């Protein structure tokens, strides 16, 4: 070790070696005092090891290495461990990682009930194949219900995706491809799709679903609702419009009196913000055939 002052080089190593040796001898004397607390003596032993590690040759008169030092050497495969600087100051605690902010957690005061339409969403042959599947699975449908189990609030029949897994994956892939454009059109924050929920629903004569929404935006992470309509041609029923309400938030979502009706047109896909209040208007049909129902593939895109 040297220090340069102008053109003169001063060698500091001999002086430092002497100081280190004297300090080590002082610490060693304290270490031998049984009147000192064991914890303090262990700390002193570590200080001696640190001093020894700073020299190129053993310190004369240092004496045997203490038991604590011996353990430290063994852990270092025979090399005396040098003191390492702390990874952070004791007063600078690591800042906990906060969860990413959910842009949907803050509810807007008003939602205008906007939606996006895709007409002729599937090729004709695929549209017809979906209709045939829906008809062929008639025996597997179950009566629909609501999360509140409210009576006379929803009337329809539902088929779950375990009965149409191939369609679920094929239709789901096409649906996912629309999301970036839909989110932009609806002026919603972008989100990652954690889950795609899907069911096949049949509405016959007299069926309906009263005013509701699909997500409160906090507990339930449903973010986009989609409805794909398909039916026999010509359409064998009347009514069944999707009614989209302008929506306020006042300690809960409330439908305004203003609304728009969307016709359930064959091969049409509709997507909208799941927080918007909406309803399925009553269906009227002169046919009792199941094949003449108002069919939909509908569900929700969930964020994490």
Image (tube, rainbow, N blue to C red):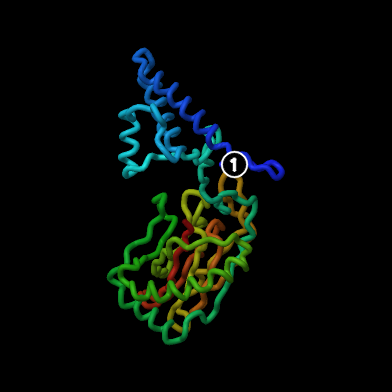
Give the image location of residue 9, x and y in percent.
Answer: 64, 42
Residue to which mark 1 is pinned? 2
Give the image location of residue 7, x and y in percent.
Answer: 70, 45
Secondary element under disc 1, as helix, strand or loop, is strand
Give the image location of residue 133, x and y in percent.
Answer: 34, 78
Q: Residue at x 50, y 63 (%)?
A: 225
Which residue occupies the foreground of this view, 154 or 254?
254
Residue 289 visible in image: no
Binning the other alpha carbons within 10 Å of mark 1 as few (below 14), some (14 to 19) or many (20 upward) gives few
Residue closest to the far top = 35
Q: Residue at x 55, y 32 (%)?
A: 15
Which residue occupies the foreground of this view, 230 or 300?
300
Residue closest to the far bottom = 125
Residue 160 left/right relative to 12: left
Quarter occupied by residue 186: bottom right
**From the image, which quarter does the N terminus lie in?**
top right
Residue 287 visible in image: yes
Quarter occupied by residue 92: top right
Q: Is residue 40 above or below residue 296?
A: above
């Amino acid at each position: 070790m040297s220090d340069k002052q102008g053109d003169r080089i001063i060698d500091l190593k001999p002086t430092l070696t002497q100081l280190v040796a004297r300090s080590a001898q002082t610490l060693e004397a304290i270490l031998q005092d049984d009147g000192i607390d064991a914890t303090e003596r262990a700390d002193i032993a570590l200080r001696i090891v640190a001093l020894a590690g700073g020299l190129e040759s053993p310190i004369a008169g240092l004496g045997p290495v203490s038991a604590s030092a011996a353990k430290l050497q063994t852990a270092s495969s025979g090399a005396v461990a040098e003191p390492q600087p702390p990874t952070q100051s004791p007063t600078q605690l690591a800042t906990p990682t906060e969860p990413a902010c959910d842009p949907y957690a803050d509810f807007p005061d008003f939602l205008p009930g906007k939606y996006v339409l895709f007409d002729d969403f599937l090729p004709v042959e695929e549209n017809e194949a979906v209709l045939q599947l829906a008809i062929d699975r008639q025996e597997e449908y179950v009566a629909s219900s609501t999360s509140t189990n409210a009576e006379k609030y929803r009337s329809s029949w539902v088929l779950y995706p375990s009965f149409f897994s191939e369609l679920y994956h094929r239709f789901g892939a096409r649906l996912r491809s629309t999301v970036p454009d839909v989110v932009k059109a609806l002026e919603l924050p972008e989100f990652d799709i954690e889950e795609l929920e899907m069911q096949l629903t049949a509405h016959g004569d007299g069926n309906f679903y009263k005013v509701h929404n699909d997500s409160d935006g906090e507990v339930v992470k449903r973010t986009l609702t989609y409805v794909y309509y398909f039916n026999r041609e010509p359409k064998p029923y009347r009514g069944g419009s999707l009614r989209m309400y302008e929506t306020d938030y006042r300690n809960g979502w409330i439908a305004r009196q203003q609304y728009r009706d969307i016709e359930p047109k064959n091969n049409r896909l509709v997507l909208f913000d799941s927080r918007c209040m909406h309803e399925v208007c009553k269906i009227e049909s002169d046919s009792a055939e199941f094949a003449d129902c108002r069919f939909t593939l509908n569900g929700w895109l969930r964020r994490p």
